[in-house]
Image: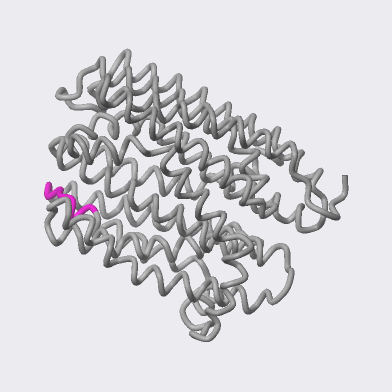
Amino acid sequence: MEQIRRYALASAGPVASAGAQFLLSLLLLRMLGARDFGSFSFLLVTAQLMQGIWGALFCAPLLIVMTHGTGEVAARKAAILGLSLVLAVLAAVPLAAIGWVMKLPSGVNFTFSFYTAATLVRWVGRTHAYASGKPVRAMASDMIYALALVASLGIVMGTGQVSMTMSFAILLLAILIGFLPLGRDFLHAQFFGWRLSDLRHYAGTWRQHASWSLLGVVTTEVTANSQVYLVTALFGPAAFAPIAATALLIRPCNVAVNALSEFERAQMARSVGAGDVAAARRMIGGFRGMLAFVWAGTGIATAALLLFAPRLLFPAHYPLESLITGACLWLLVIAVRFARAPESSLLQAGGAFRPLAFASVISCAFSLLGVLILLLAFGPLWSIMGTFIGEVVFAAWTWREARRWQPAGAKP
């Protein structure tokens, strides 16, 4: 029961926030054309990529610095918080340029870029809460964000004015409200607790953790989402729409693995920091069992939906055969992703970013080549199978590295 309670605490906030975003995506799926929905989904994937990059550059190192407590903790923490804020603000410019290249309205570009920048800062705040032993703050931030987003959605649906600009505007508003529960100590540390001279202390973090973590994130993104970029680049946003639509069906799985990985990584990091790797390894079994339960539940719900009421979610211009094919392929992908998640979290908790980076570098080559071949041979939808190939390689390498890994000085 205690483990279930812990998992419920870990997932409540992310499930609520992702559920609110899911409602927004469903609304846009039904009310926007294929090109606009494909564009919106592509921008969200871009925002998620930025979150992954921030996780590598700042969140994972912040967790290590605050939990392992080795050398210049205050200085390194200030450097991480300060540089993350500076780069989040600067990132708004290239993010807006992406929309400009896609020939989207300026309002979409503006709101999307600032929503993503604010999301990156909040992402660091959630990690700060976990590293400080205050997971309730992270959960409360997610819950407030979700409530604000749902309330805004209700207003938008009442007016009947649904657009990409309005969607990103309400996402931005909800994110800003979500800062409030993170606490005065984080807000002060993030916005006022550092100086420009502190940023030089990030160099050690970069060499020790962030550089390898960043390589891992970028290549993991290629492994997981190469079909997103290749399909959109070669065939346009409308061709990507069916892939994005069927990906909505496995959204609960992505929410679960992200939420539980973040929670378990923090627990594992504390055990590793105390020198008790055996305790961290014991968490793998329960973690994997919970993920298996989530995958099975998602598969059953997806099958029921597509067999008995597919038009409840999907408009008629999405063929049922394509929906079934896409759903089955995504379930295969997420099954392998779930299988490697516990070992990946263990390696991250111990700061072993280099072996993870090698795993993702190798897998991304398989994924990119597989997606490209399948895309050109069988069309956009079957390119998902290329992602599956990359995930299998990634999982096999991660399992091997997790078995080998043992930090010096740890208790057996």
From the viewer's perspective, tell me whether residue 198 is left or right of residue 281: left
Residue 384 x, y percent position in the rendering: 36, 27
Where is residue 347 shown, x and y percent of the image?
66, 46
Q: Is residue 152 above or below residue 36?
A: below
Above or below for 190 versus 174: below
Q: Residue at x 43, y 72 (%)?
A: 85
Q: Nearer the viewer, residue 227 or 21?
A: 227
Q: Is residue 16 magenta?
A: no
The quadrant of the rendering that contains the N terminus is: top right
Question: Could you tell me which residue is drawn at 46 percent across and 23 percent down?
Answer: 332
The image quarter containing residue 236 is top left
Residue 340: image location, x then y, percent? 59, 34
In-front residue for pair 300/88: 88
Tell me which segment is drawn in magenta.
Answer: 160-167
Q: How is the image coloured?
A: one colour
Residue ID at (28%, 63%):
94
Residue 267 vs residue 108: left or right? Answer: right
Residue 72 picture quarter: bottom right
Q: Say which residue appears at 55% left-offset and 34% top-offset.
A: 394
